[in-house]
Image (tube, coloured by chain):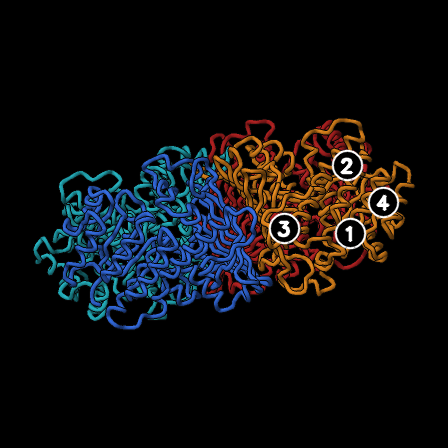
Chain colours: A cyan, B red, C blue, D orange
Amino acid sequence: MKRKLRMGMIGGGSDAFIGAIHRAAALMDNRIELVCGCFSIDPEISRSSGRACFVPDDRIYASWQEMIAGEYALPESIRMDFVSIVTPNMVHFEPAMAALDAGFDVVIEKPMTWSLDEAVKLKAQVEKSGRTLALTHTYTGYPAVKEARRRIAQGMLGKVRKIYVEYPQGWLSSRVEDDPASNAGWRLDPKRSGKAGTMGDIGTHALNLAEYVSGLRCTEICADIRACVPGRMLDDDGAALLRFGEEVGGVLIASQIAAGEENALKIRIYGEKGGMEWLQEEPNTLIMKWCDRPAERLRVGNGYMSDIAKANSRTPGGHPEGYIEAFANIYRNFALTVSARREGIAPQSEWLDFPTVDDGLRGMQFIETIVASGYEQEKKWIKWVE
Amino acid sequence: MKRKLRMGMIGGGSDAFIGAIHRAAALMDNRIELVCGCFSIDPEISRSSGRACFVPDDRIYASWQEMIAGEYALPESIRMDFVSIVTPNMVHFEPAMAALDAGFDVVIEKPMTWSLDEAVKLKAQVEKSGRTLALTHTYTGYPAVKEARRRIAQGMLGKVRKIYVEYPQGWLSSRVEDDPASNAGWRLDPKRSGKAGTMGDIGTHALNLAEYVSGLRCTEICADIRACVPGRMLDDDGAALLRFGEEVGGVLIASQIAAGEENALKIRIYGEKGGMEWLQEEPNTLIMKWCDRPAERLRVGNGYMSDIAKANSRTPGGHPEGYIEAFANIYRNFALTVSARREGIAPQSEWLDFPTVDDGLRGMQFIETIVASGYEQEKKWIKWVE
Amino acid sequence: MKRKLRMGMIGGGSDAFIGAIHRAAALMDNRIELVCGCFSIDPEISRSSGRACFVPDDRIYASWQEMIAGEYALPESIRMDFVSIVTPNMVHFEPAMAALDAGFDVVIEKPMTWSLDEAVKLKAQVEKSGRTLALTHTYTGYPAVKEARRRIAQGMLGKVRKIYVEYPQGWLSSRVEDDPASNAGWRLDPKRSGKAGTMGDIGTHALNLAEYVSGLRCTEICADIRACVPGRMLDDDGAALLRFGEEVGGVLIASQIAAGEENALKIRIYGEKGGMEWLQEEPNTLIMKWCDRPAERLRVGNGYMSDIAKANSRTPGGHPEGYIEAFANIYRNFALTVSARREGIAPQSEWLDFPTVDDGLRGMQFIETIVASGYEQEKKWIKWVE
Amino acid sequence: MKRKLRMGMIGGGSDAFIGAIHRAAALMDNRIELVCGCFSIDPEISRSSGRACFVPDDRIYASWQEMIAGEYALPESIRMDFVSIVTPNMVHFEPAMAALDAGFDVVIEKPMTWSLDEAVKLKAQVEKSGRTLALTHTYTGYPAVKEARRRIAQGMLGKVRKIYVEYPQGWLSSRVEDDPASNAGWRLDPKRSGKAGTMGDIGTHALNLAEYVSGLRCTEICADIRACVPGRMLDDDGAALLRFGEEVGGVLIASQIAAGEENALKIRIYGEKGGMEWLQEEPNTLIMKWCDRPAERLRVGNGYMSDIAKANSRTPGGHPEGYIEAFANIYRNFALTVSARREGIAPQSEWLDFPTVDDGLRGMQFIETIVASGYEQEKKWIKWVE
């Protein structure tokens, strides 16, 4: 394909922080251009946001339905190739289904849908359509995370024994949702967010990270979750004991009332021979710890990193890449994969390394399972809800 | 008392690492002298160890029974004042009971006894004897930990909401107990160690730290523990969800198969207004995190620290104190308290800040509770075993 | 201006790491588009690089002279607005002069020119042309650096007393220049690099950072520089004592033979009341240290940061921004400033916060001064060469 | 020698922080007992300090002259073996000379004497007496520092190229010497301190550390030193370019007006193959950095450390040792060496690893050299003053 991929956006207007992140991530590698959007449920905001993004007026839409229909009606040489859906959870499923139905590829925020049932249907739709869906589980886009996954797959730690994943944030320590300008409101509202609050918002990231790096699948959960701040209808804090099959245990922590924490997602995995540690707030460093020799501090951008890490970084060692670059890796790998399909060539294996509808489905199963366990008082272990 | 306190030791010979730590901790503040000991169950090792410590031959004993009888028979102006018991768990209770019976004060390693039943009896004996028992939960001896407790008690974090305590070690990742020179053997043997392995050895430290700093008491536990390395009869790994009453949740991690970890005890506590974090491997730093302003890095030895931290540190800021100094704080506060009692004066409140028989009993209750929960498959929450 | 700014590139082809960084930085904020370029001195590489960037063939040029002439000949509605010059040092001056002469604005890599004489002339040309020149001293683009400058300007540290700036890299520890694929070759060649090696390449960054953050100007230098690795004609290592007027001292370290270091630019400034510290490899953190209270750890993206930091960051706290975002801040502020000028409106003061031709001139004076001092054996202090 | 070594103290009363440190360091390894002292120039403070240390009244002296005479007059079976001199600099030389003359061994604080001339004489006296003098350059007592020295000696970094040593403190940022209770007064008074302030107090530590770890000797200095805070007669801040022979360069920073710093002594050494880094405030970690593989984080107390580190540490990995233990290593190695000499046996090589009169002389030469260079305005390099 001798041209950039054309992106449309649903959501992500000037009233939403995440829209600008998606645009920066999509644009920075010079493979994608923004051509259209319905940037807000409020047509005025959609209009002003689109103009601020230099989208021509005739490609700024007042509703996502209009946008999909409108773009579909355009000549192929002009119309968008894919849509990015960055709206609250209850507005994921329908536009994604419609976009796929119209032949567009899809990038979508996590959690993938409002309910598990929607996720099952969306997966079927992706398969039926032959289109590609990328889920923005940003954190597995970091090169150091890919390095970690690779090294575990190569057996460097020996058999995995224990997984600790934690995701403490503090921004919901007080009732920020009472401020209408906050984007906490919909996240704590079951009608817009779904069954879970914190567990959907960041617990899914934690679980995805644990499974991605370890290559294992969670099979049972014993959780304690709660709305800690009075008046909330959804969880803002929780923790769980995990099992990954018979022999591997784990602990998952996700909290948004960990006052003073920013975005301290962290994973540690221990095997027979050693352990590894990665902290999102220092994302270019991967620590490998050994029983019988000094710990090593791997740094992204150096020659000793594996090919998968190199394919997902842009700078030499010591020139930090961050959250937007991790995000950009998802967009770039998605774009490379989609472009390859459109050109009829086989994608390189490293291009396929982005979260898909399967990860999205698994995230919704996680929400279902942890909510079931988290409020349960009697029964200890809840099997993973398929 | 115009003299140093006289210490006898049970255990702690040249075949045990912890003996030298106890001696360094006891001696460094120049308030205690070592006068006698039964340093090993092996009389030859006891003899050579005693001589290496410059103990005269007539004060080196072949058994703890001989030592207590022998010292008791000496004139008061010569005989030991207190005994330090640093033997494996199954040799804690009897010598402690006998020492108290003979009027000696006692310092004892954790866990306090082999069984909960013994702990109950020992507490009764302490109370009956009017003597003082100090338990060497070293980590609450650190000045930064005392600072943390003080600041939480003063309400700086607001109401506490969440407690994370973790204690990963890696030294039992392989079967080190097969090496007879290892001191892992007795720790993994129920006959010598008691009901728990890792949970007794380091889980008790973690729980003690959580309760000491927060000022709260654990009331329910939901745990998953196991012997991860094949062939072990006691747990070497585990984690638990905790409740401290109705409104405060927690997570406790203790593992000795976290390959590559050294001694990474860490506590984080979050309240309404902020959080705090302390890591044993960087013990002179206490991090205070805030919702609305930058995190602060408190450092031991500075003028802004509270009196309790100052009373338990020896050097100016930036001159690190460590594990032995934390240990020494227990000995010094114990010595000051015992000396005060003997002189008939009231101890200053900060001298009383060391772990006692109550902490020891609570540790044994913790072992009882977490073992009950840890292997339980059906019932989720186990109430604290009194 | 209701459109994006149109960028052309000189240099930055697929044989140069820095080109992709410039493009990502320019594109990510969706205010600039890449329309043309002469990407390499090798027309084939220029062609393939341009195509890989989706530049149409008729806007890919074989020489920078052709490009400036060609673009100038295009209608204003199409032609580039500014040119980014990312070539080796000896190809900075001429294209910049020509571009300004043709009315284009200019972004240029540091050091600004090959010689001080060129820099003086270029400054005159900028002033004469009324155009804008931005110099990519990336590191002052970081929001935490801007916060540091602001806080010092506000007097938070009191009167500044001491400045330590250091920039250790290790990549020239061996003769990497013997590999033709390395981009070390031209940097160590006086004909292409100028009078200095390391001092031009990274020493200028260090000096720029020190002056930017402190608000002070270096007035005297006493340096020791050398080519440490045998056979080099330019310095690969050095250090200097600095004076900033009569009362403020400093130390500058710049080395590319600090084996094992990546890109560890660091600045510390001490005043009467406290100190501050910033490390490029952890760029979102600014440490403020105080004589009488705990050190504070300021983190980019939080509400307590000042407006200038907020205006130069994109993500909430804990979502790391990195090197490319710092770079992007220069492009964005340059673009906002240029667009404002073209629209005839006054730029906001924070848009003007990017390095200009004055910084470029000052960098060339630094090279002149430190080279003069660095090989001097007798005379201690060399006055800043104006 | 089947007994502990008997220590007497000159200085170190309750009005001096460092006395308690010396006692803790001497006592903790159970090889030394405190038997006598003249703890202060004020006989009342000497008396009360001695009693607080449980020294009997007849061994508490009113002057150091009385003490040396008094102890000398006692039977050999009772009298002290060595004296620790922990007084201000101007009271080092005379008591040390007298003690050696009377056949006592000596431990002495740094800088060794008030003047270089005294140091030369003291060295002659040590040699003549056949006695042992240990200088308490505490920082080379750390096991990680000994590991660093060993690894460089083994050639792990290849040929050394560059040494950075820095020692920033902030406690003299304001006029603390105006408080009579401060121990800053004598340090800033040339009559009591000697030619240098900060350079004598901590600059000597920095130089000693650089030479100890690298195994190299400084040959030339180009320094800038000054009294930054008005009214001071001695330097409180400075920095220097160093040469270690023809081919190795260095930078030394020492400041006591680095506001907000505690005791941040740090050394970095770079060779052909890699670099190393050690920071006193995290003393149990040694970082090894490599050109072509990940940096390693060596931690004291682990099996992979070399014998010299193991011989100077007491705890397993992760149980931090600190400043007092580093200090204790000097006392213990001194005690082992002295005891061996007295028993007529050859000391083991690792016992001899403590700073001696040669280090003390070198420190005084450093002061002489850096003061000569530091105020010099014209001449760049000053040769090391022998």
Whether tag 4 and tag 2 are in contact, CB under 8 A, the answer is no
Residue nearer the viewer, D375 or A269: D375
Image quarter in which the N terminus of chain D is found? top right
Nearer to us of marks 2 and 1 is 1
- From the image, tell me which residue sits under label 2: D132
Q: Any mark on residue D90, and which? A: 1
Pinpoint the chain carrying mark 1.
Answer: D
Residue nearer the viewer, A355 or A186: A355
- The crowd level at tag 3 (other Cα within 10 Å; few <14, some 14-19, many 20+) is many
Residue C373 percent coordinates (x, y):
50, 50
* Mark 2 residue element: loop
- Disc with the residue nearer the chain's start (1 vs 3): 1
* Kind of residue at badge 4: Glu
Image quarter in which the C terminus of chain D is found? top right
Pinpoint the chain carrying mark 3.
Answer: D
- The crowd level at tag 4 (other Cα within 10 Å; few <14, some 14-19, many 20+) is few
Pinpoint the chain carrying mark 4.
Answer: B
Q: Respond whether the residues carrying marks 3 and 4 are from the same subunit.
A: no
- Disc with the residue nearer the chain's start (2 vs 3): 2
Q: Any mark on residue B76, and which? A: 4
Q: Any mark on residue B143, and which? A: none
Residue D265 percent coordinates (x, y):
59, 49
* Kind of residue at badge 3: Ser
For the residues marked 2 and 3, what is the alpha-carbon distance in whole angstroms? 33 Å
- The crowd level at tag 2 (other Cα within 10 Å; few <14, some 14-19, many 20+) is many
For the residues marked 1 and 3, what is the alpha-carbon distance in whole angstroms? 23 Å
